[in-house]
Structure formats: C-alpha cells, structure tokens
Amino acid sequence: MWGETKARFAELGAQLGRRVAYYRAIYRDPRTPWLARALLWVAVGYALLPFDLIPDFLPVVGHLDDLLLIPALVLLAMKMVPPEVMEEHCWRLAPAVLENVPGRD
C-alpha cells in the first residue's frame, strides 16, 4: 500500500513539473496576449504570497479560495492563448499534458 501511494505522489510531482514547464513556455512566447500573461503572473503570485482573500485559519473556507481562485485564473489565461501556441509548446515541451490542457474543448 505504501509503495503504491509513494508511486502516485511521484507521478503527481512529475505531472506538476511538466505543467509548470508548459505554462512557463506559454508565458514566454511572444504570441501570448499580455492579459493572459498577467493572469498567469497573478495566479503564481497569489499562490506564493503569504496572505489570502480569505484567511487560511478559517476551517475549509480558508483554503477554498486557493482551490478555486488559482485554477480559475490559469483556466481563464489559457482560454486567451491562441491554440497554435498551446499545441506547439505541448508537443515541444510537455507532450504528456496535451490531452489535459485546461481550457481546451
């Protein structure tokens, strides 16, 4: 059981690393609209800053803003990125996330 859980956490970590590389490449691409870049920057900043809109010491509700706001900002940013930019960076940098790109219909 522990080995299975450890393997699952390792896979989640690897997937997170691929997604970070993918979002970083999209952020650096000159064809990415400035508003999408700003939203990605705000999402990263909000995740790293020590304060939140709703304080974390409030049970459940305190962490709910992190679980909803950050993915919503990333999703909104990805909707603004041209499809050819997303696909180019998926194939070049992170092919394992191509089928799980947020904002793709």
Image (cartoon, grey):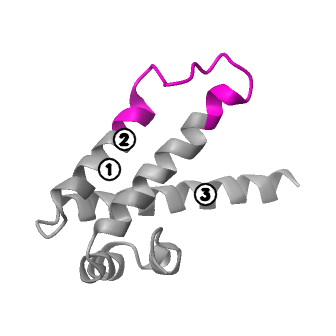
Residue 95 sits in which quadrant? bottom left
Is 57 in the magenta? Answer: yes
Is 41 in the magenta? Answer: no
Query: Which residue type does callout 2 highlight?
Result: Val
Which residue is denoted by mark 2 in the rendering? 44
Residue at 25% x, 63% y is 25
Which residue is denoted by mark 3 in the rendering? 12
Image position of 4 (left or right of 104): right
Residue 47's x, y, as percent?
Answer: 44, 35
Query: Which residue type does callout 3 highlight?
Result: Leu
The magenta-colored residue range is 44-64
Residue 23's x, y, as percent?
Answer: 33, 60
Residue 52's x, y, as percent?
Answer: 49, 24
Q: Mark 1: which secondary structure?
A: helix
Q: Mark 3: which secondary structure?
A: helix
Cα separation, mark 2 vs mark 3, equals 19 Å
Query: Which residue type does callout 1 highlight?
Result: Leu
| Label 2 vs 3, first from the N-terminus | 3
Give the label, 2 or 3, closer to the camera: 2
Residue 63 sits in which quadrant? top right
Residue at 56% x, 23% y is 54
Cα separation, mark 1 vs mark 3, equals 21 Å
Image position of 1 (left or right of 18): right
Q: Mark 2: which secondary structure?
A: helix
What is the number of the mark on residue 40?
1
| Label 1 vs 3, first from the N-terminus | 3
